Amino acid sequence: MTSTWRASIYLFDTDDLRDNGTITKAHAVLTTSSGTTLNGYGRARRAPHDRDVPEIGEELAAARALRDLADRLMRATSDDISELEHADVQILR
């Protein structure tokens, strides 16, 4: 059996009014072959004195969103196994 899952990362910038900098936000979306969707979120902040290299902020925000997504997928998997086993399950990393 072969399955295809789709992952998309959406990036956008906002102004950080408190620190007078830029925040890059990332929203990672995973859609499984059965149509289940999981979301992960990440952000990166560029301080005013940092060099303006947008790709670095995008990379960091995307990495954080993917890490959040992976953690959520691990929790969902653990919950699914717990439901099948009728007992608490911890998945080792």
Image: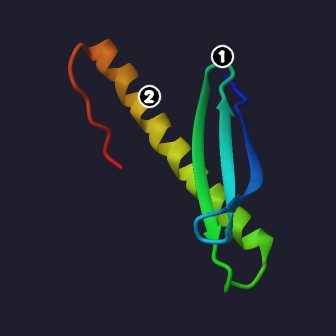
Label 2 crowding class (10 Å Cα cut-off): few <14, some 14-19, many 20+? few
Q: What element carries label 2?
A: helix
- Circle 1 crowding by C-alpha within 10 Å: few under 14, some 14–19, many from 20: few
**Horizontal placement of 40 versus 23: left or right?**
left
Which residue does the numbered mark 1 point to in the structure image? 34
Kindly identify the residue that appears in the image at 71 percent across and 72 percent down. 56
Quadrant in which the N terminus appears: top right
Disc 2 marks which amino acid?
A: Ala
Badge 1 or badge 2: first in the primary sequence: 1
**Which residue is located at x 68 percent, y 80 percent?**
48
Q: Do the residues labelled 1 and 2 touch (CB within 8 Å)?
A: no
In percent of width and height, residue 59 lies at 69, 65
Position of residue 56 relative to residue 70, above or below, is below
**Where is 48 relative to 16, above or below?**
below
Q: Which residue is drawn at 36% across and 29% down?
A: 78
Position of 34 with respect to 64 (left or right) is right
Based on the displayed image, in which of its 4 quarters is residue 18 positioned? bottom right
| Colour scheme employed for the rendering of this structure | rainbow
Q: Residue 70 carries which label?
A: none
Q: Which of 61 and 17 is in front in this view?
A: 17
* CA separation in Å, label 1 and label 2: 14 Å
Numbered label tally: 2
* Residue 36 coordinates in the image, percent (x, y): 62, 20
Q: 8 or 83: nearer the eye?
A: 8
User: Circle 2 sits on which residue?
Assistant: 76
Name the residue: 79% across, 70% down: 54
**Label 1 amino acid?**
Ser
Question: Which image quadrant for residue 71?
Answer: top left
Of residue 58 and residue 12, the one placed in the foreground of this image is: 12
Of all residues shown, which one is farthest toward the front? 18
Local SS, label 1: loop
Among all residues in the image, which is located at the extreme left? 87
